[in-house]
Image (spheres, helix red, strand yellow):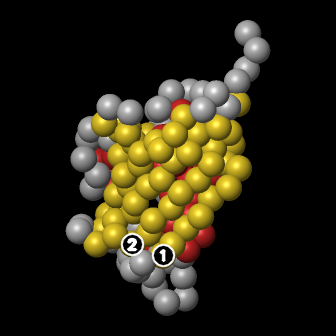
Amino acid sequence: MPPGEDVGMTFRPEDYDIPSNYQHWVGDTAEDHIGPFFFYMEGKHPRTAFRVQQHNCNAHNSVHGGVLMAFADYTLCLGANGGSNESSATVSCNNEFTAPAYKGDLIHGRGEVIKRGGSMVFVRCEMYVADTVIMISSAVIKRIRTNK
């Protein structure tokens, strides 16, 4: 996002050739700058999407691993908070890269909660392009509760 842009800016999935049932999570400028990323909830399971642009690629013209890890973290945290506005923080995250993705590819994420505790949530996700899994991630996410 260029300097001076509105922090609460909303992105439209259609502008990135992503189906309109996805929505943009407003308020995370790091994710907006990297992505933008989009999601919808299928019950309790996050479904995410991200269209690869040139600024997401490394010297090999494939998606930079750090970009994929940020997208996985987005998906994992949505699983932990159930798509709500509950804050969370990643405690640990493990990633296995299985195939590359390239400029123009539409990357999808599928997340699932393995176990939800009072303060910690164990989640996993797969990132894929078409039918090819490109990355598998798992994480421990800390639920941050606010006193009201």
Left or right of residue 104: residue 75: right
Which quadrant would residue 58 be assigned to in this image?
A: bottom right
Q: In this view of the protein, which residue sits in the foreground, 115 or 123? A: 115
Q: 56 above or below 29?
A: below
Rendered location of residue 114, percent (x, y): 47, 44
Q: Amino acid at mark 1?
A: Phe
| Residue name at image x 67 percent, y 31 percent | 119
Mark 1 highlights which residue? Answer: 97
Q: 1 above or below 45?
A: below
Q: Amino acid at mark 2?
A: Ile
Secondary structure beneath label 2: strand
Residue contact at pointers 1 and 2, CB within 8 angstroms: yes
Q: Is residue 79 visible?
A: yes
Rendered location of residue 18, percent (x, y): 29, 52
Which quadrant would residue 43 be assigned to in this image?
A: top left
| Residue name at image x 64 percent, y 27 percent | 118
Q: Looking at the image, which residue sits at the far top?
A: 148
Q: Is residue 34 visible?
A: no
Cα–Cα span, label 1 and label 2:
6 Å
Mark 2 highlights which residue? Answer: 134
Q: Quadrant of the C terminus?
A: top right
Q: Looking at the image, which residue sits at the far bottom?
A: 60
Q: Earlier in the sequence, mark 1 or mark 2?
A: 1
| Residue name at image x 46 percent, y 32 percent | 83
Q: In this view of the protein, which residue sits in the foreground, 1 or 109? A: 109
| Residue name at image x 34 percent, y 70 percent | 133
Q: 131 above or below 77?
A: below
Number of numbered discs: 2
Secondary structure beneath label 1: strand
Rendered location of residue 30, percent (x, y): 63, 52
Left or right of residue 53: residue 33: right
